[in-house]
Amino acid sequence: MKNKELLIIDGNNAMYRAFYAYKTLSNGGTNVSIIYGLPSIVSSSIYMHKPQDVIIVWDGERSEFRKDLLPTYKGDRKSER
């Protein structure tokens, strides 16, 4: 029996990666980096790993939980606000 593989993708991480990887991608002044980049990242991951199932998970309304688990999470990054 062949092993079943499950690919779990962190949707928030993939979305941010797409935004910064394709930051200059626009359509008449509207930034479309996430619209183009997110499916590109997901499809390349599927192609590379060839899983039987794929799940994309997103942070819920409590997106600060990572800082609760690890206070130094992204501590070296500059604030973009």
Image: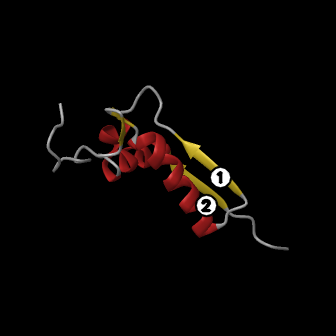
Quarter of the image that includes the C terminus: top left
Asked whether 50 or 61 is in front, the reply is 50
Outermost residue, top direction? 61
Query: What's the residue type where badge 1 is placed?
Result: Val
**Residue at figure coordinates x 14%, y 43% from the top left:** 78
Q: Which corner quadrant of the image does residue 47 belong to?
A: bottom right
| Image label count | 2
Other residues around mark 1 within 10 Å, as few (<14) / some (14–19) / many (≥20): some
Residue for badge 2: 46
Closer to us: mark 1 or mark 2?
Answer: 2
**Residue at figure coordinates x 31%, y 32% from the top left:** 29
Quarter of the image that includes the N terminus: bottom right
Outermost residue, front direction? 28
- Residue 70 in percent (x, y) is at 29, 46
Does 44 sit left or right of 4 as displayed? Answer: left
Residue for badge 1: 54
Asked whether 27 or 59 is in front, the reply is 27
Q: Are marks 1 and 2 in contact (CB under 8 Å)?
A: yes
Q: Which corner quadrant of the image does residue 27 belong to?
A: top left
Give the vertical position of 44 relative to 27 (above or below): below
**Residue at figure coordinates x 37%, y 50% from the top left:** 17
- Residue 42 in percent (x, y) is at 54, 53
- Residue 76 in percent (x, y) is at 16, 50
Query: What's the residue type where badge 2 is placed?
Result: Ile
Q: What element carries label 1?
A: strand
- Which of the marked residues, 1 or 2, is nearer the chain's N terminus? 2
Q: Which disc number belongs to residue 13?
A: none
Asked whether 24 or 6 is in front, the reply is 24
Does 14 sit left or right of 31 as displayed? Answer: right
Q: Can residue 41 be seen in this view?
A: yes
